[in-house]
Amino acid sequence: PEGSVLATRPRESLCVEMEFHLELAPVTVPALLVLLHAHGVVDARRGFGLRARLEGLLTGRMDLVYESEGRFYVLDYKSNLLPDYGAESVARSVREHEYDLQYLLYTLALHRWLRFRLGDAYDIARHLGGVRYVFCRGLDPDTDDSPGVHALRVPDALVLALDALLATPREVAP
């Protein structure tokens, strides 16, 4: 969507299967849900199983992180079989499968990584590009409307609020 063609990107601008480790300060499930719901994320979710709070280390891998014109993007490949791959169907699948929670955590991981790597030069508005969910079955090189691609940028306010809520004391120390 930003005009990048991944096949033409320099190898050094791509990080395939980027591993992340998010340290999560103890947070009550209701406090987390209040924040998520206020931003329209996982509106139907009322809990996380029997857990009253979440804490610890969340680990995972992002399919691809890439840089384009100084901005960094998370790209996740999906193989879902959908009736069609227009914007509405893809957005509905993102909501129904709670990929919005997934991409929010990926964005938080990328935000923390960029803040660490770039130090004082890091500017969330300038460096954090967005999220690209690519529904591979819907890709059609013969159309210009990007069927099968769900592209967005998580609002800075949500990233910063989630980061603050889940920050451990060591992360917020001066």
Image: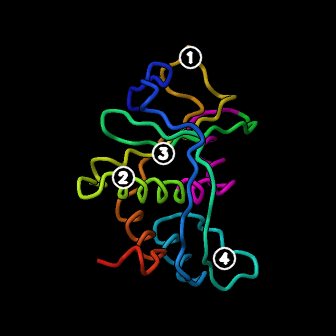
Which part of the image, by quadrant, shows the C terminus?
bottom left
Count of numbered circles in the view: 4
Please tell me which of labels 3 and 2 falls first in the chain: 2
Q: Which residue is mark 3?
A: 131
Give the answer, above or below, for where 11 lies relative to 35: above
Amino acid at pointer 4 = Arg
Q: Position of residue 150 (x, y in %)?
A: 54, 40
Q: Residues within 10 Å of mark 2 (few under 14, many from 20)?
A: few
User: The magenta stretch spans which residues?
Assistant: 84-103
Does the magenta stretch mainly form a helix, a strand or a loop? helix
Helix, strand or loop under label 1: loop
Work out how far the residue at label 4 is from the one at label 1, CA to CA, in angstroms.
40 Å
Q: Which residue is mark 4?
A: 46
Work out how far the residue at label 3 is from the one at label 2, CA to CA, in angstroms.
19 Å
Amino acid at pointer 2 = Arg
Q: Position of residue 46 (x, y in %)?
A: 66, 76
Q: Residue 93 in magenta?
A: yes
Tell which of 127 and 169 is nearer to you.
169
